[in-house]
Amino acid sequence: MRDGKSLRVAGGVLGLIGLLAAPAFIGDQFTSVLIFAAIYTVILSGLNLFMGFTGQISFGHNAFAAFGGYGTAILTTTWGWPPLAAMLAGVGLSAGGALLIGYPSLRLRGHYLAMATFAFGLITDEVALQWRGLTRGSFGISAIPSLGVGSWELTSDLQYYYTYWLIAGIALWTAYRAGGTRFGRALHSVAGDAQAAQALGVNVAGYKLRSFVLSAVYAAIGGSMFAHYVTFISPEVFGLYMVVTLVTMLFVGGIGTTLGPVLGAVTMSLVPELLRVVSDAREIAYGVVLLLILLFAPRGLQALATISLPSRKARPIPAPPPAA
Amino acid sequence: MTPASATPLLAIEALSARYGHVEALKPTTLSIAEGEFVAVLGPNGAGKSTLLKAIMRLIPSRGSIALRGRSISDRRSDELAVQGIAFVPEGRGILGPMTVRENLDLGAYARWRRRARCEIERSRDSIFTLFPVLSERQKQVAGSLSGGEQQILALGRAMMAAPTLLLLDEPSLGLAPRMAAEVFQALEKLNLTGLSILLVEQKAPLALKLATRAHVLRGGRLVSTIDPRAVTSREELARYYLGLVH
């Protein structure tokens, strides 16, 4: 059992060293790809809380990322707010939006909740497209300032890389820590058996809402990070593609697992870039890779580690009695 | 255990519940005294589980429910847990991926607001004493326990809330006779500690061994009340089931 844990820790340390050393070996293009992976890791950490830990479905977290992205973009470019304050305002806006949307829609379950959140995402996308006075519609908002504090700001991809991965690490760690607390156990109980959880004293509706709002906060931070890094946003960024990407990444990495968000984000960011070598057949190859992952790791990439290692909590099988 | 005071621990009056157009539980009046062990018997579809869910406010219902004389009709189920009513649902509601210990700790969820951590730890220790199998398997994933062990875990988890009333839905369901007998032994132990129990059960002989009083529910209506000591044969029990004796 201890060997299994040691191997997992060793794997984690190696992964961390690889991530830290990567920019020295992978060049500008892949550094940029991994910066986007860090942004997705932040968003997925929150989505994992809601979909993985709490067992709910959301196809609308692109809307909360849009709140963060547009919040920070509008406040910095139109109103001249400092980036960090604008980011916090965007996060607050997203949390407020999640509270307003979540209160009525979280009464729904399963497919109905999925449809309601999906509709919310589509509406947000449409508003971003049509409310030209605020969002500049399909032209998007450009010249968004770099992220920084006071006179210090991120200027190079390398700075963005380490800063964003630090934020992603904090997002993963906070979500992981939350999972082990009373709050996290309550979320797990809601996912496991909502009726039993309610009878144990867990306010199921309240916890669903808290989880939804918290996940929206992560999504807004990710959206804001995107806006500051790319310095341009438009409605397409937070559209249907983002919904599909988020859900794919979460399932590929391992929904409800600790490292699922980072594994999914990194893998599904790198795969399309690596498949550029097959140029015309890229889309087909991407589909094949996705199918292979889901075929051999149906519970996600993190589950692969637990399959190949001895289970921590496996019950010992008693030896058969000696033959008479 | 016998009733200890005039005000019942739980009093339900004209409690009814429906699923769509079907009235699964017709207006039902019932009470449980402190320390009493009451069984509700009846065939499949009699409305037994509906009765417990209506008491726990897990389904919409009509009528009044009072705990120690104070109305709890407008309370949510999580608030009822805080007030000392524990519910073990049919199917146990065990969280399979969590360990036995984590499941038990979740049982103390309602107490975390009002009790100190050390008191909860003492409760866990006393449950381990009461059910040694849980102590032996505390680090094991709950989903890997046998059916009987899971039922014991469900009981232990409910006890972590330090309840005054335990509502149990078909604890013998899906268990081999020996395991069912063990579960009922555990219930007897709990009742001897002064815990009031309202048990819903299809296996009448098992329930009547422990219950101080039993009611028969049929077609969503209470049709008879049984003094378990007075039932001496299966034929007599059948007469109660058919509502020929009230």
Image (cartoon, coloured by chain):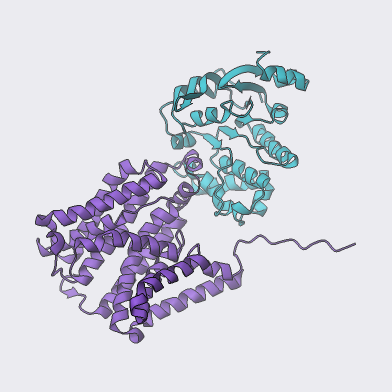
Chain colours: A purple, B cyan
What x and y, as percent, mark residue B109? 48, 44
Q: Nearer the viewer, residue A95 or A55?
A: A55
Q: Which residue is drawn at 44% across and 65% down?
A: A252
Residue B57 horizontal side relative to residue B134, left or right: left
Relative side of B90 to A226, left or right:
right
Residue B40 in sight: yes
Q: In which quarter of the image is residue B246?
A: top right
From the top left corner, tell me how far across and down residue B32 is, in percent: 58, 23
Task: Determine the residue positioned at 76% across, 22% down.
Answer: B234
The residue depicted at 46 percent of the width and 79 percent of the height is A14
Q: Answer above or below: position of B43 versus A7.
A: above
Give the residue at x 74% y 39%.
B177
Where residue A142 appears, as percent x and y from the top left, is 14, 68
* Identity of the residue furthest to the front in this view: A280
Farthest residue, direction bottom: A25
> In the picture, residue B140 is in which quadrant?
bottom right
